Amino acid sequence: MLIRRATEADFRNMCITAMRAFHDDPVMRWLYPDDDAYFQPDGAVFAGAMTNWIAHRQPWCTDDAAAIAIWFPPAVPGEPEPEAIKVGPPPSPELLARFELIGPPMEANKPAEPHWYLQLLATHPDWQRQGLGALLMDAVFEQADRDGIPCYLETERPELVSYYRHHGFEVRSEWDLDPDATLGEVGPHMWGMLRPAP
């Protein structure tokens, strides 16, 4: 199976893969609880994020983009964050409120030391359980290990805590998103997991 860096030509397939893979993910469906908003044609719910990931980050995919990984390289001190590319209509006030709740605790729980950050790992349901996720992680593990740099991710599913432990990650922290009076609900439980440098 060919694992390669993704390009703009993979955009549509990557959006569809992400949308199908995360259709029941606790965080994604807390952000987008309405089916009409989430199941837009061509995985449009991921279009804004995918545009920025392809432009600025380290996306990897299988040759058909049935499995994808979004890796952020270690931050370079003093280097500014790339300017976000705006895609589509502005988010609703409710969606903005949800992102404002989820962002700060995620940032607070990230390791302070330089690390590779696995923002997203997704395999289309029709191709799951074939080891594609492991191949996409290995693509960066090799470089991280060579450079002596740890890897970090968040997950929201207990079964994925076990999956990532199998690949060398250990739970570093866990937290619940605080309830918010404007939303009237509690957000999902999350685990932060670190794969130490060798």
Image (cartoon, grey):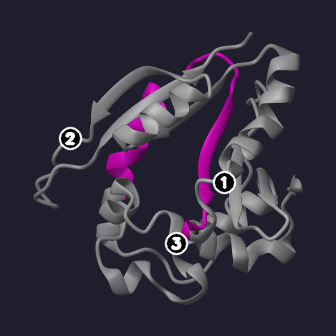
Q: In which quadrant is the N terminus drawn?
A: bottom right
Left or right of residue 64: residue 67:
left
Q: Return the disc, 3 or 2, that comes first in the chain's sequence.
A: 3
Element under label 3? helix
Residue at numbered disc 2: 178
Kindly identify which numbered label has been placed on residue 130. 1
The residue sitting at 39% across, 58% down in the picture is: 25
Magenta-tinted stretch:
99-125
Between marks 2 and 1 in the image, the one whose residue lies nearer the viewer? 1
Q: Return the disc, 2 or 1, that comes first in the chain's sequence.
A: 1
Disc 2 crowd, CA 10 A, few/some/many (<14, 14-19, 20+): some
The question of residue 106 being in magenta is answered with yes
The residue sitting at 57% across, 81% down in the picture is: 44
Element under label 1? loop
Q: Height in image: 160 above or below 44?
A: above
Q: Are marks 3 and 2 in contact (CB under 8 Å)?
A: no
The residue sitting at 88% across, 18% down in the picture is: 146
Residue 68 quadrant: bottom right
Q: Is residue 35 visible?
A: yes
Residue 196 place in picture, x, y as percent:
64, 14
Residue 186 place in picture, x, y as percent:
17, 49
Q: Return the disc, 3 or 1, that comes first in the chain's sequence.
A: 3
Foreground residue among 18 and 177:
18
The residue sitting at 44% across, 22% down in the picture is: 171
State the separation of the CA atoms marked 3 and 1: 16 Å
Kindly identify which numbered label has been placed on residue 20. 3
Foreground residue among 70 and 113:
70
